[in-house]
Every structure is written in structure tokens, then in C-alpha cells.
Image: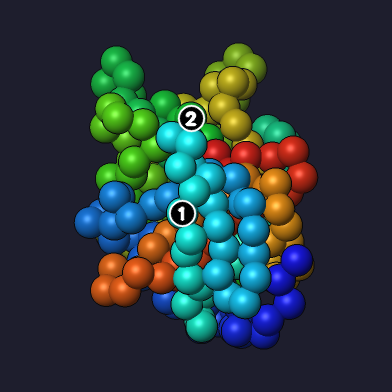
């Protein structure tokens, strides 16, 4: 368990920092995904999908976020969401939806390249302006600064709630998604999966 106060800063400052980092397409290579194996003195150890363990220093102003299970009922008009999508048959189709807590509205707002898989995919952080039901699926109209998108949400889409987290959520065995700083070998943000949840990012 990590209790160092250096792991958490007021959410407003963290949100500004992480918003800049999450929205930078050049940082697609600066994401680390894996399982937390240790957390101590401002450093975490993560075993990646390739089986290697890396030690990562947390920046003094690192933001911590938690994802928990949700379902299609959480996708409502007026919610601020993050959606990873792929283009299929000329349409954008969601693979995952992150429903942000209201305190995180505006986090990394925009539509930009992402690195969920090897084939091209996009992240869209935006406000839901309209929800249409198409059978059991949903079609979302999304608005963000400078643009809008229409994205199909199949029933197979992974849906999670996304909120800020206290440092004690950095527990060994948790799945994590890490955003590295562009100009330093430090983590700017850590997205932590609640027990049994893998951050679908």
C-alpha cells in the first residue's frame, strides 16, 4: 500500500496535467499496461504483458484514477465520456466507454489517435449530446471543443466508470494503465482497475 502524500495532488492540478498528456497523440508509445507488483516510496513495479517487470517513478504531481465496472445504463445524455473506437464499414464503432465522474468533465477533451491495438483506433473524450437506441445497441452523438463524432456502441462494448482515486488503491495485483511524462522517465498518471477490473485502455 502507498501512503506517501507525494503520490497525490489536488485534483484540479492533476486534471490539467493529465489532460495535456492524455490528449497528446505523440504519447501513444508512452503508455504502459500491466499488473502492479510493488508500490513503495513513490515508485511502482509493473509486470507488463510481455512478462517483464519495470520500475516506474511517480511524478510528484502524478494523478491517480480508478475504473470500476459499469454497464450500458451509465451511458446517458449529458455525461462526459471517453470512447476508444475503430472504423468499421465507414462507421466509428466503440470498443470501450469510460463514463467520467462529473468532477473530471473536460479531461483530455478531443478526438485523437490511440494505441489500444495495432490497427488504427481513436480516443474521443466528449459530452454526449444525444443517445439513440438501435435495437439493443446505442448510437451516441458526441460534442467536444472543435468537433463532433457519431459512434456506435454495440452491446459487446466494455463500459467502466472513471473517477479520481486515493493512493491506497495502488494495491499489488491490480491492473494498471500508466501515462508516462514526455520529458522525464516518470509516470504522470496511473489508471487503476478496481479489484477484478482491467483498465480497458
Give the residue at x 48% y 30%: 95
Do we see residue 59 in this rendering? Answer: yes
Question: Dot 1 lies on which element?
Answer: strand
Among the 4 quarters of the image, the one containing residue 22: bottom left
- Where residue 83 appears, x then y in whole percent? 47, 42
Please indicate whether residue 28 sits to the left or right of residue 42 in the image: left
| Chain-order first, disc 2 or disc 1 | 1
What residue is pinned by disc 2? 95
**Is 188 drawn above or below residue 190 in the view shown?**
below
- Where residue 67 appears, x then y in whole percent? 66, 50
Among the 4 quarters of the image, the one containing residue 8: bottom right
Give the residue at x 68% y 33%: 72
| CA gap, disc 2 and disc 1 | 28 Å
What residue is pinned by disc 1? 54
Give the residue at x 73% y 61%: 169
Question: Dot 2 lies on which element?
Answer: strand
Amino acid at each position: 500500500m502507498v501512503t506517501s502524500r507525494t503520490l497525490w495532488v489536488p485534483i484540479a492540478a492533476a486534471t490539467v496535467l493529465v489532460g495535456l498528456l492524455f490528449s497528446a497523440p505523440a504519447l501513444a508509445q508512452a503508455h504502459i499496461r500491466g499488473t502492479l507488483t510493488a508500490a513503495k516510496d513513490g515508485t511502482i513495479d509493473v509486470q507488463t504483458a510481455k512478462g517483464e517487470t519495470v520500475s516506474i517513478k511517480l511524478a510528484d504531481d502524478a494523478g491517480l484514477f480508478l475504473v470500476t465496472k459499469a454497464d450500458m445504463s451509465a451511458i446517458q445524455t449529458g455525461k462526459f465520456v471517453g470512447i476508444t473506437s475503430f472504423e468499421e464499414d465507414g462507421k466509428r464503432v466503440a470498443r470501450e466507454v469510460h463514463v467520467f465522474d462529473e468532477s473530471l468533465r473536460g479531461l483530455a477533451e478531443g478526438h485523437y489517435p490511440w494505441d489500444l491495438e495495432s490497427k488504427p483506433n481513436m480516443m474521443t473524450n466528449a459530452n454526449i449530446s444525444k443517445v439513440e437506441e438501435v435495437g439493443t445497441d446505442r448510437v451516441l452523438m458526441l460534442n467536444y471543443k472543435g468537433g463532433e463524432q457519431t459512434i456506435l456502441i454495440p452491446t459487446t462494448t466494455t463500459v467502466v466508470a472513471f473517477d479520481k482515486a486515493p493512493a491506497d488503491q495502488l494495491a499489488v495485483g491490480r491492473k494498471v494503465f500508466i501515462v508516462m511524462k514526455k520529458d522525464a522517465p516518470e509516470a504522470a498518471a496511473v489508471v487503476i482497475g478496481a479489484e477484478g477490473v482491467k483498465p480497458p485502455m
